[in-house]
Structures are given as C-alpha cells and as structure tokens.
Amino acid sequence: METYSAAKPHIADYLRPLAARKLLIVLAVVLATGGVYAYYARKPNVYSATTLVYVKDPGDPVTGEPSPQSTDRSVQNEATLLYSRETAAAVAQAIAYPGTPQQLLDQVSISSRPGEDFVDVSAQAGTAFGAAHIANAFARHLVTLINGTVTLRVANALKLSESQLATLPRGLASQVQRANLLDQINRLELAQKVPTTAAQQIDAAEVPGAPSAPQPLRNALFALVLSLVGAIAAAYGLERFDRRLKNPDEVEDAYATPLLAVVPHADDPAAMLGHEPALSADLREPFRVLRTNIDLASLDAPPRTIVVSSAMPGEGKSTVVRNLALAFRETGRRVAVLDLDLRHQTLAELFGVRGGAGITEVLRREAELHDVLRQVGVGVPAVDELLDERIALIEAKSRNGHNGAANGNGAGNGNGAVVDAGGFALVLGGAQPANPAAVLASDRVREVLDELRERYDIVLIDTAPVLAVTDTVPLLRYADAAMFVGRLGVTTRDTAKRLTEFLARMPDLNLLGVVANDLSRLESGAYYGYGYGYGADEPAPPRRRRLRRAPERPKQLA
C-alpha cells in the first residue's frame, strides 16, 4: 500500500503554524502598525534644540593650582545645579515663561559628557523658536552661574588675604610672610579686574527646521517589527495547544489505522464538465491512489459495498464519495452511489442533479429500487474507450425495441429510454424520515444492499457522521467494509480517539483505513513529491458522445 510517511521534519512543519494563522498575524500587525501610526500622527509637533557649554577648572584662586576634585565630577556638579527649582524660576523669569518652573524643567535635558569638559543643554517646545530660546537661556544661566561662582571665590580669597595681612605683626620675622601676602593680594586684585572665564557657550542653539517628534512613520515601523515578532511567537505558542490534526502522519497515528490516501485542497472539489460531474485536475491522482489502495486492501475478497463516513460533520466524506465514484467508474466498473445520510443529503448537489424520490421511499415500500435509481453521466473520456462496445450494444437493442434492463447490468432505465452506459447509478436519500436511525436499522436496508451488491461491482454508501448520530451503526454491520475521512486542520485528536474507541467495540468491522482530506497546498509537494500535480497539465476531457434520453422523466436505471 502506498504511504505518505515523512521521516524527517520538513519546511512545511515549521511554516504550518504561520499559514494556519496568517489572518491572525496579518490582523495583529495591521492593527498595531496602524494604531501606532494614527496615535502619533495626531500628537502635536515637538521641536528640539541643543547647545554646548564648555566648563574648565579655574584652579585655586590663591595658588592657581588645579582643584583637587576630578574634572568629571566638577562638571557634573555644575550641570546638576541647573535642575534646581531656583534655577528654573530664574530662567522662567528671564524668558517670560508662561508656565511653572517645574513645567519648564520638564522640557529641559542637561547632561555632562564623561571624560570631557562639556555640558549638553537640550530643550523641547511646541515651537521651533521656543525650543532654541529655552536651551540658550539655560546655557547662559549655567555660564553666568559658573563664572559668578569663580568671581565669588576670588573675592572671598582676597578678603581672607587682606585679613591675614592686617593681623600679621610687623618686623623682620614676618617680612617674608608679609611679602607673600602682598603678592597674593596683587594677584587677586588683578583677577577681579580681569575675571577668569570658567565657562562659555560654544554653539548657540539654532532654531530647528523640522519637528523632532512625533515620528509616526518610524514608530509605526518599530511597531510593525514588534507586532510581527509577537504575532509569530503567539502563532507557535497556540500551535502547541492546538489539538487539531495538521499532517497525514498525525492522522494515521490518531486513527490507528492505515492511511489510504491524502487528498489535497482543491478550489473546485466537485468539478463539472458541462453538465456532468468530473474529477478536477488536482484530485485525479489522489483519488486514483485511493482507488488502488482500496483494491489492494483485500485482494482475495474485494469489498463490494463500502461505507464512507467520518467522526463529525464537515470533514468532507460526501465529497470523497463523489470523487471516489468517478475514480472507480473510469476503470469501467459498474458503480452505484447510495446516499444514506438522511439527515443532511448533499450528493444531489455534488452530482448536479435534482432531488426526488430515493431510498426512504424504497425502505417504506412506497417504491421499488429500480424506480429511484438514476443514471448520472460522467465527464471522463477513458470510460468511452472502455465501453464503446457496450454503448454500441445498447444502441442496437434500442433500435430493435429492447429498451429494458439491458442484461440486468443497469444499462436501461425501465421506461423505454436509452441511457448513457458511461455513467453510474445514484440513489438519493429521498424524503427525510422522522426517525432515520430506526429506518436504517430495518432488515429492508440489508435487502437493498444485497440487491445492489449483485448488480454492481462497487457500491459506495455515504452515511451520517458516526459520533454525531447513531444512524451509521447498523450500516457498518451490513456493508462489506468501511473507511473514514478526517479533515486536516478540522479533526481533533480527541475526536479521532473517540472514534477509534467506538470502532474498537465492533470486532467484526472490516476497516479499510482513513483518508486525510484537504491537505494544504503548502504541504502537498512534501507528501506527493515529484508526482503531485503530474496530471494537472492533462488536457480537459472532451465532451462525450451522448445518447438520446427520454425528456419527460428523470434518468432512471432498471
């Protein structure tokens, strides 16, 4: 049997969480990026201006030697003085600032440069001129403050020297000391006349030409990166807690049964060729693989009646029945499809036929089986090649007036109308009974299945989900075999476990295996390899030659 095991993780395993939650990722990124951009775009403009103040150590006013404190610490201390309320109040008064001193301090940033004798003074304001004006005002105040401190130190030193000279006794013993004090006083008086510049503003703050904030584009790009990283992390986090089956290997393990086939996602899983059902290019080979694996499952006693079901609704069992019937029919085998999902009948829509009487009427003995059998044409050219002789035989009998059952093989419609031998038989569900479970548990169902088994090579039975209702349970006993469909990204591990436990209580069940349905395009290449899509380039099958039909009644099979 063909398998699809992946021995090593491939790139699809890592991309699956992103592909499964791509909408969540896109939504998170769009909302975060757009929200940040809109938020900052609505904020008022803020302008920034910066100036530089040079601060040098004036040294001791008496000896002229450098200060014992480190230059970095001295500069840092001078810069810290500007953060006082007293300084802010003086600057606010000087520039006629309308707010409080604290509000003015909140607009200023002052920092010293490590290892250098410079202080950066930055200011922010709602106008470009206001930012430059505030920065320059604080810088001038710093220069004035530092230089005033140096002048005060010189004045205090001069006062101290004069006091010492006045108290010094006269005489030869103090002559040298008096000379030193006089020299010191002369230097200090000179320093007062020519004050030392300990601080000066190097570059005055210029009026900025553009606002420094907000920057909605920059902030939006930053939010995009953060939200993308966060959304991707969330996607992988959610993946660890996601109980859904993601790849065929998980399906085979969860169901503890052979994997019959992997059906890829198709844009049109119920393709039509004209007015006839056909297999789409994406599904031809997967369903041929499924047909082959069913044949290989029981070579000695191939099953004639096969129940196709699922654990829960929405896993694609009816679509699998439809396309598997087409795959069997293209080999020339006589195929019948029976819709026994009486609660939710979908085969009529999938095959493109109108509803009407069906199996319910047969089970109620309101109609015979041949009255509700419908012949459905197939848009598959291979069937014509296999059945040319059979069609010719039907045409010959039609001309001779023998329009009956055509050797009991389902070629006639029982109403004198010749039908297309290239199709297959379809039995719809009919009217929905009040108690489907009781109707399907009747012995009449076994009789109908036995009759179809005798007349057709393959009978595919679409049934209700096993875990949803009990309608399918008696059919599992009547049919020759059963197969289940699990949908990737929908079926959960818990659901598969419940189904496996349920089927374990039916030891006589001939379980063929499970079909992994709706494999994403991202992973199709990894599991099908080179062969995936090999038939996609096949030309569209031509319209088959059709025989005349009785227009007044729907196609039926005797």
Image: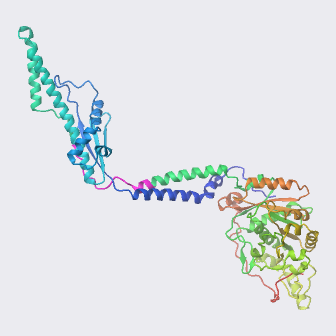
131 left or right of 215? Answer: left
Q: Main secondary structure of the magenta part?
A: loop
234 left or right of 524? Answer: left
Span highlighted in magenta in the image: 201-220
Query: What x and y, as percent, mark residue 365?
Result: 92, 77
543 left or right of 217? Answer: right
Quarter of the picture holding the N terminus: bottom right
Query: What x and y, as percent, mark residue 87?
Result: 25, 39
* Residue 163 in which image quadrant: top left
User: How many circles with numbers are drawn on the protein?
Assistant: 0
Quarter of the picture holding the C terminus: bottom right
Q: Is residue 299 above or below residue 344?
A: above
Q: Is residue 332 above or below residue 123?
A: below
454 left or right of 54? Answer: right
Q: Residue at x 54, y 50 (%)?
A: 230
Q: Is residue 78 above or below residue 384?
A: above
Task: Tell me, yes or no, whether the highlighted magenta stretch contains residue 203.
Answer: yes
